[in-house]
Amino acid sequence: MPRKIIIDTDPGVDDAMAIFFALCSPELDLIGLTTIFGNVHTALATKNALNLLEIAGRGDIPVAPGASDALTRPFAGPVPAVHGADGQGEVNLPAPTGKPLNISAAEFIIERLRAQPGEITLVPIGPLTNIALALRLEPRIADWAREVVLMGGNALAPGNASPAAEANIRNDPEAADLVFGAGWQVTMVGLDVTLRAHITPAHIADYAEHGNPMSAHIARIVPHYQRYYEANYDVGGLFSHDSSAIAYLLAPELFKLRRWPIRVGTRGLGRGKTWPATGRRILPEWEGRPLVNVCVGIDGARTVDLQSERLRGA
Ligand code: BDR
Ligand code: CA
């Protein structure tokens, strides 16, 4: 039986890659996308989610629109330098034919988890606001979810949105602290591993040769994103952030985990930093918090090759 997943996403170039990677993997059954601000505003994230499903020929998969702002603050704004003003590398996709659901992302998540307790894995690859809102509306989702496997955070690595913090968590640290503190199993696929999953120029050239609509779209949208990485990091190509969460679902043996409780910084320079309690002495702020599976090691080459293989076979 394929594993049922809901991807909560802010597409986003690497979000598009992750969604297509999931759709090309028979082990996974994508039962819905929920959208969130982050790389773009939520309305554009919803449009892009519909577009991506239509490119994949999966317009049957529902899309539920999420929150427009973080729990305690307005959204800080999109990152056109990274993903393009359209979130899809400036290719300016046409209006999708499909429409989003008229229930919110949080309501959709609650409804689906209630209907199939123990079966659905949440895969957030954007800020965690929708997941926190769903937890607030219905705390029992922490019992109903099979697992939460998220792209976000940095336990031991430096941040990317600030020296301290990773972008998804920094966009809503209060939401992230709620999600890491709920009594469900969270697996954190953060910068500790995603900055070691290197998509090379050779991989990128290969996408254009696959001859299917998903790989062709990736080949179109990646150059803008790649230019950002090549200008800002010492790398040719780019890093596979969101797809690393999908790779974990498919091949957890490619990852090394540590189990630590996590708190999220909400103030000052450390806003958005995910702080693991790595020592034996647990301070009161971490006491009683659930142990998070924190990915600290990865076979980056194999995770990236796995994505290419799946897309090539689409
Ligand atoms: C995360 O931030 C976004 O820019 C990417 O889509 C990814 O989810 C990486 O820090
Ligand atoms: Ca993302």
Image: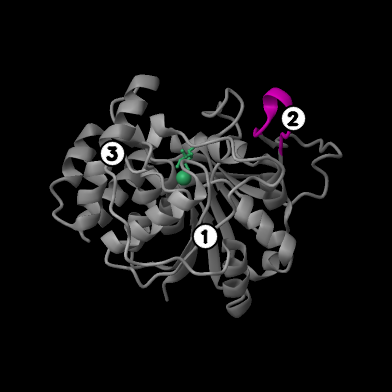
Residue 74, percent from left and from top: 64, 40
Secondary structure beneath dot 1 equals loop
Q: Amino acid type of disc 3?
A: Val
| Residue 137's disc number | none
Can residue 302 be seen here? The reply is yes
Report which quarter residue 304 is drawn in: top left
Q: Pointer 2: residues within 10 angstroms few (<14), some, or many (20+)?
A: few
At label 2, the amino acid type is Arg
Distance from Cα at disc 3 to Cα at disc 1? 25 Å
Residue designated by label 3? 222
Report the Cα–Cα distance between label 1 and label 2.
28 Å
Residue at position x 28%, y 46% in the image:
305
Residue 65 disc label: 1
What secondary structure is marked by label 2?
loop
Q: x, y (%) of residue 130?
A: 61, 55
- Overall secondary structure of the magenta stretch? loop
**Cβ of disc 2 within 8 Å of ligand 1?**
no
Which mark is nearer the camera, 3 or 1?
1
| Quadrant into which the C terminus falls | bottom left
**What is the C-alpha distance between the residues marked 2 and 3?**
34 Å
> In this picture, which residue range is highlighted in magenta?
264-273
Mark 2 highlights which residue? 267
In terms of sequence position, does the residue under pointer 3 or pointer 1 come before the other? 1
Which one is in front, 226 or 237?
A: 226
